[in-house]
């Protein structure tokens, strides 16, 4: 009698499918989105900190991919695949562009598949981009190295055996969130390299009696293996704030257009996690402002569509009185639809707009033109010229040489 397959073995088998052209085209848009996020953060404090370390430009780019809070996001897994997967897929020892894109698709799949099984108890304490991220990065490297199904199981088991990443960094002015991405990358690469030499990992690392679920979850969800690659489920973020703030921003923009202004009291009703992560009426830093419902709604009330400049210190100071007009509270109906749907209701002047899904979600997708415009805006914010932005768009969407992307990143981060 054959042994029952563990979830990791089932996932490894699922990852062996062929990647189709349409999915590779979708992956190119996510690559461009990540490049835009990196470019936008090239003059950030963390970029200045990393530069003297003489680390590779790819490693520096890895730290920058989620600094601006504009990285892609999967709703039900509640994580950001792009910052973890793309530095793994673009490793210098991974082959041509098709191999890079295939590896990225596989990485997105594994990271989302694991992340979507983690429950609310896990999310209350652990950063899923870190915990599920090691699985995503390991799957990306395993695909790029051409590992067999058995070797991929070993890589996933090894990486998963040291999965982690605690949310305490949310409560302090630190750059740990970016380091979590680098840790997932480094841990996964080590796991895959050791698996290449025959070191094995636990098959039941997820559901075993002392596995990830037992340690970090109360009610893990079933793992799903859909036919369509799950990179198609990933949302793009149009604004530089925590994704939990986006539904309220989106609804407020519609209400602003309806009323012509947002004067007087503004009431935000949204789901519980949005309140837990983004109820901050008095942000002090740009990072805190990006995690403040009050600040993001104050931006819409005074300026309309948020820009990155609206989260800088001058704007934080300027909007203090407007933030005081914003109150937030949970709506049980909206919480009940979460995390499959990120929604919000915004009230002002006896009018209200409620949105079930947010711009950038699969139900309300950003167009290719909007994604390109977003990338260009980020590159401009990061000080790149129009010519440099044109080159980045062309390399991401049409290029066939990953080395050219490495060279471009080297010039950006020199």
Image (tube, rainbow, N blue to C red):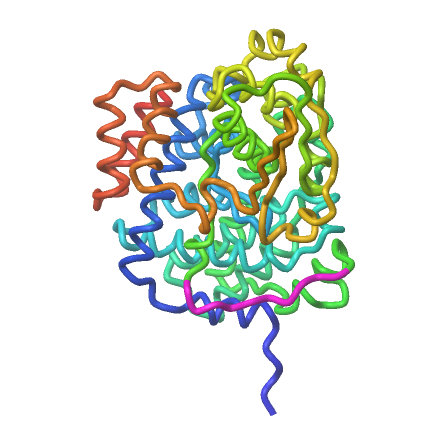
Which residue is drawn at the image coordinates 72% and 60% (left, top)?
213
Say whether residue 44 is left or right of residue 269. Answer: left
Q: Is residue 118 visible?
A: yes
Seen from the viewer's position, the closer of residues 25 and 148 is 25
Occupied quadrant, residue 329: top right
Specify start and end residues of the magenta stretch as a single range: 219-228
Q: Is residue 110 above or below residue 46?
A: below
Assign the magenta stretch its main secondary structure.
Answer: loop
Rendered view: 192 above or below 53 = below
What percent of the width, then of the height, locates residue 228?
41, 64
Residue 277: give x, y in percent of width and height: 69, 34
Residue drawn at the location 60% of the way across and 66% of the way down: 223
Does the stretch in magenta take in 352? no
Q: Is residue 179 visible?
A: no
Residue 298 picture quarter: top right
Left-right relation of 149 to 271: left
Q: Is 321 situated above or below 330?
A: above
x and y percent of residue 333 in the render?
Answer: 70, 49
Q: Nearer the viewer, residue 102 or 235?
A: 235
Task: Residue at the far front: name it.
Answer: 350
Q: Is residue 267 left or right of residue 376?
A: right
Identify the image quadrant of the N terminus: bottom right
Q: Is residue 221 magenta?
A: yes
Q: Position of residue 138 (x, y in %)?
A: 50, 54
Residue under the point 35% across and 20% down? 414
**Along the line of sight, the residue nearer the viewer: 52 or 17:** 17
Nearest the viewer among 21 and 309 is 309
Image label count = 0
Instruction: Check the image and name the residue furthest to the bottom.
Output: 1
């Amino acid at each position: 009698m054959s042994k029952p397959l563990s979830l990791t073995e089932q996932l490894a088998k699922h990852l062996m499918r062929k990647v189709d052209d349409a999915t590779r085209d979708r992956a190119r848009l996510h690559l461009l989105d990540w490049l835009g996020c990196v470019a936008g953060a090239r003059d950030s404090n963390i970029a200045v900190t990393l530069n003297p370390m003489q680390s590779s430009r790819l490693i520096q780019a890895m730290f920058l991919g989620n600094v601006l809070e504009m990285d892609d996001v999967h709703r039900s897994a509640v994580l950001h695949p792009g910052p973890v997967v793309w530095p793994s897929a673009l490793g210098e020892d991974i082959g041509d562009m098709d191999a890079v894109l295939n590896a990225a698709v596989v990485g997105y799949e594994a990271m989302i598949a694991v992340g979507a099984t983690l429950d609310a108890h896990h999310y209350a304490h652990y950063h899923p981009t870190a915990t599920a991220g090691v699985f995503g990065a390991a799957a990306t490297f395993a695909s790029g190295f051409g590992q067999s199904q058995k070797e991929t199981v070993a890589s996933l088991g090894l990486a998963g055996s040291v999965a982690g990443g605690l949310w305490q960094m949310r409560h302090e002015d630190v750059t740990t969130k970016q380091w979590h991405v680098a840790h997932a990358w480094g841990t996964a690469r080590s796991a895959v390299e050791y698996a290449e030499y025959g070191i094995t990992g636990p098959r039941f690392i997820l559901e075993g009696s002392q596995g990830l679920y037992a340690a970090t979850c109360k009610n893990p969800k079933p793992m799903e293996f859909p036919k369509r690659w799950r990179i198609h489920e990933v949302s793009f973020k149009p604004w530089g704030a925590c994704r939990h703030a986006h539904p309220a921003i989106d609804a407020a923009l519609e209400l602003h257009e309806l009323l012509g202004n947002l004067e007087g009291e503004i009431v935000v009703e949204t789901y519980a996690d949005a309140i837990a992560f983004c109820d901050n009426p008095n942000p002090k830093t740009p990072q805190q402002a990006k995690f403040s419902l009050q600040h993001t709604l104050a931006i819409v009330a005074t300026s309309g569509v948020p820009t990155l400049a609206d989260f800088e210190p001058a704007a934080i100071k300027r909007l203090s009185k407007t933030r005081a007009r914003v109150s937030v509270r949970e709506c049980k109906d909206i919480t009940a639809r979460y995390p499959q749907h990120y929604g919000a209701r915004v009230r002002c002047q006896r009018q209200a707009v409620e949105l079930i899904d947010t711009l950038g979600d699969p139900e309300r997708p950003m167009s290719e033109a909007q994604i390109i415009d977003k990338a260009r805006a980020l590159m401009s914010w990061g000080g790149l010229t129009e010519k440099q932005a044109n080159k980045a768009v062309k390399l991401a969407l049409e290029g066939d040489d990953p080395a050219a992307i490495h060279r471009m990143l080297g010039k950006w981060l020199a």
